[in-house]
Amino acid sequence: MTERSEEMKRILENFNWPSTSNNKPPLGTSSHNVSTNPPPNVDPPIVGEKMDEEVKKLLLQREAEVDKAFKDYRLQRDLLDIYCDDIDRLFLFTALTLNMSFSYNDYEDSFTNLHVYLHNIQRANPHSYTYIKTDVMDRFELCFVAIRCVINAFIGCMLPVIFISSVGIRGEYLNTMFVAVAIDGNNNTTPIAFGVGVANSVNSCTWFLMRLKDAIGAGTEVALITNMGDTIASCIGQVFPDAYHGYSCNSVLNYCRLRIGQSRNLDYLFFRVCKAYTTQDFKQTFSKLSHGAQEVLHNIGHMKWARAYFPNIRWNVLNINIPEFLMVLSVSQRNVPIITLIDAIVQYIQQTFAERCVMGGMLSTVFTPYAEMVLQRRMQKSRQWKATKIPPEIPSMLPSDIFQVFDFKRTCVVDLNRHTCSCGKWRSLGIACGHALAAARYTNNTELADMVQIYYRGDVFRTTYQTRNVNVVPPPSEWEIPEPLSIVLIPM
Ligand SMILES: [Zn+2]
């Protein structure tokens, strides 16, 4: 064992395991059966507005634990190479750190009981969307889970953008996890639906997308983002024929590298082109890319990856990352029962909502911390910028809302009435740019509520999380058996 691995082992041994768990697994033992551990205690679901100070304190402590877990997880990821036989310990480690319970024990038996478990998700979270896909022999192929209140939070309060990805997992039968992730007004990622299945095939992807469409409603206008090259990308058009479908910018860069090889300045120029706010800035930098890169990117279609060409529905979203916890599950899952895997994700979503509920309760600002930060930065930067009013072409008694703002580099035209600025930033992010703030200062308007999209408001953030509780599923001893009972067989 190398010196580095010894060091990692020492870190792992010294990690401060949560006090609720007394079943720290011994190092160096290859424990493949996580089910032998008794479930640690799990806090009951948090009730929104009635949360008292004690509960808040507890959750804040837990938040610190989660931060620590993820910090150490990065070290853990390096550990994967060293303890390759010990991968499921990482799952155990993460789940315990997040105070998660293991609700189900037997790997093969968990397929048979999947219907019962999903029925109990429905009991805990009425009207949620749970489906199982089987083959003609009733053998398990794929399942889909979306908690009703999470979907409602997405439709009512989050940006209408969903990143959908498939993630490979390691298991005797299970090989793929599908995840649909959205972002809220504080730029937090939230998984809104997920699936676990045996294959990342066109058939599975199409089925997952159809269930997602059932959950969000066929009439909901959304922008869908996928990675280029993901099988699921090729199925979007069939299930969502009218929706905007773009690619995550990182995956476009990867594709470009694969096609033309890594060339000098490719990454730098690509991100400058990709992040340009106006078509003019886009064209200027695009011409500096190599001929090969220009051709590849042109063939993809600018609207799919370049911010200057995004339709309104995509907002400012270049990439959405899959929450790290799900990535941990994907690398660590090995013969973890499917019910345990799904339950861990449901508990993760429950904790995410509970923690953000506490955060919402403590918000005293008009906007979310993310929007406040952007506004502060833009206000600071535009403090000295000069705004002048442009008189209307047709004389009118009404005050003009159009301004020219000089920012010491260029002059931009702001229309306060239409919420636009020629720099492109206001429309793209939905938060007033420095030019707009300078123009508002000129008119002595200190009221910013109108200049920021509703998604970024503190009260919307609070409502999103305080009025909705994701409930965890009770332990198996309390499960209700549905009637008629359908049995799912173990996959091929
Ligand atoms: Zn501007």
Image (cartoon, rainbow, N blue to C red):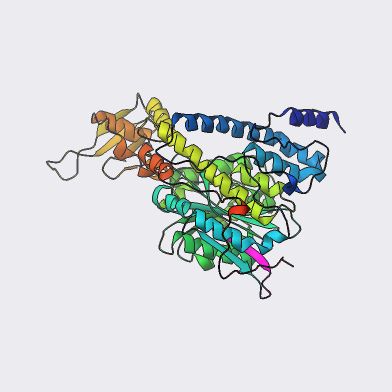
Residue 147 shown left or right of residue 258 in the figure = left
Numbered range of the magenta stretch: 137-145
Residue 29 shown left or right of residue 450 in the figure = right
Name the outermost residue toward the bottom.
136
* Residue depicted at 63% across the width and 31% down the height: 68
Q: Which image quarter: residue 19?
A: top right
| Residue nearest the viewer, comparing 75 with 305 | 75
Q: Is residue 348 magenta?
A: no
Residue 241 shown left or right of residue 250 in the figure = left
Name the outermost residue toward the front.
477
Please state the horizontal and vertical placement of residue 352, each as a whole percent of the image.
52, 42
- Quadrant for ligand 1 reads top left
Please state the horizontal and vertical placement of residue 84, each as a whole percent of the image.
81, 44
**Quadrant location of the N terminus in the rendered image:** top right
Q: Is residue 332 above or below residue 72?
A: below
Q: Is residue 138 magenta?
A: yes
Residue 424 visible in this rendered orientation of the protein: no
Please state the horizontal and vertical placement of residue 103, each as a whole percent of the image.
64, 50
